[in-house]
Image: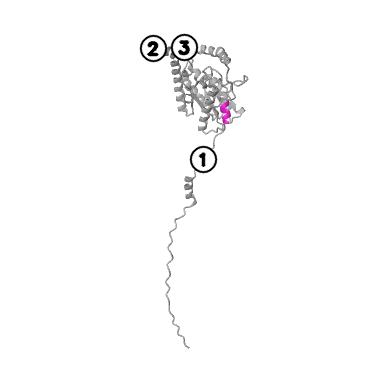
Amino acid sequence: MVVGVTVMSVEVTPFPEPSRPALAAVPPLEAAVPALEAVAPPLEAVAPVLKRARRLVVLGDSTAVGLGDPLPKRGGWRGVGPLVAEALGVEADGYLNPAFTGARMRCVLTEQVPAAVAHRPDVALLVAGMNDTLRPDFDAARIAADLTEVIRRLREVKTTVIPVRFHDHSKVFRLPPSLKRALSARVGELNAAIDEVVARERVPCLDLDRLPGAYDLTVWSVDRLHPSELGHRLLADGFTGLLAEAGFDVPEPVSLTCSGGVEPSASGHVGWLVLKGIPWLWRRGREFLPYAAVIMWKSFQGR
C-alpha cells in the first residue's frame, strides 16, 4: 500500500510584538531631592534651635528693684527680675540685679553697666527714664546718648538688651490737670528719645502703654508709682514674649496668677505714704514745679 504524502510549505509570518509605551527617563537621585524638600521642609524649619539664656541682668530704677511686689515676712522685694529668671530657667548664680531706687539713665550707664558687662549676660532688661522726667535738668538728647551707650557696651559682650518705653503715668498718678499735662509732655519727650535709639540700634523694646490692663488700678501698688505683683507679672510676661520672638527658649511661661508675694495691709499703705510717699512727692514736686509752671503758662496763653 502506497501512501502519498504531500508536503506543504507553510510560511510563518512573525506576529508583531505588542507595542509598549515609552518609559519616562528616571531622574537621578540628586534631581529628586528638591521635589522631596518641597513636600517636607527641612528639619530646621520645623524645629528651630532655640537659644538658652543662662545669665540675666536687670538694670534700672525702683521698678527694676521690684518695689510694689513685697515678699512675706519682710523678705524684701521680688518683682520682674526673678519672675523672668524663673521663666527662662536662669539659675541663682546666673542672675544679677544692680538696680537701685532713684536711678536715672546716666546712673545706669556709669554705675550699673560695669557690673553688668562683667557678668556677661545673655539678656539684659532695662527699666529707666521715668526718674529723669521729674528732674529740672531733664535732657532728652542726653538720655538718648546714654541709652545708646548702654546698649552698645552690652552688645560688645553679646547681650540682647530690651529697654522699655513708658506709659502715660499721668493717667495713673492723681495730679491736677495742669500737672498731668506737664507730666504727659515729659513722658512724650522721653519716649521719642527711646524710640529713636531703639530704631537706630535695632533692639526689641517693651511698650508699657500697650500692656494689657496697663491703666487698671489692680496693676499698681498703693503709691501708684510702682507696679503691684500683677503689674510685675505683666512686665515679666511682656519681656519673655519679646525674648521668645528673639529666639530664646522660655521653658516656664510667666503666670499672671498672683502667688508668693504679699498684699500690703491698710496700715502698711498709710506707713508707706507717711514715711516714703509724701517725702518723695515733696522732693520731686519741688523739682518738677518749675517745668509744670511753664506748661501751665503756655496752656493759658493758648486759650
Does 86 lie within the magenta span? yes
For the residue labelled by badge 3, is the local secondary structure a helix, a strand or a loop? helix
* In the rendered image, the vertical position of residue 257 relative to residue 4, given as above or below: above
Q: Earlier in the sequence, mark 3 or mark 2?
A: 3
Q: Which mark is residue 46?
A: 1
Residue contact between numbered discs 3 and 2, judged by CB atoms under 8 Å? no
In this picture the colour scheme is one colour
At label 3, counting other C-alpha atoms closer than 10 Å, the crowd grade (few under 14, some 14-19, many 20 or more) is: some
User: Which callout, 1 or 3, points at the residue further toward the start of the chain?
Assistant: 1
> Secondary structure under badge 1?
helix
Please report the bounds of the magenta region as a residue range. 82-88
Who's the residue at 39% across and 12% down the image?
A: 300
Q: Which residue is label 3 attached to?
A: 289
Q: Residue 175's x, y, as percent?
A: 47, 14
Pick the front one: 121 or 257: 257
Q: Amino acid at mark 3?
A: Leu
Q: Helix or strand or loop: what does disc 2 sit on?
A: helix
Question: What's the residue type where badge 1 is placed?
Answer: Val
3D distance between C-alphas at marks 1 and 3:
57 Å
CA separation, marks 2 and 1? 61 Å
For image coordinates 53% across by 12% down, the residue present is 278
Q: Main SS type for the magenta part?
A: helix
In percent of the image, x 56 and y 13: which residue is there? 270
**198 or 296: nearer the eye?**
296
Mark 1, residues whose alpha carbon is within 10 Å: few (<14), some, or many (≥20)? few
| Circle 2 residue | 300
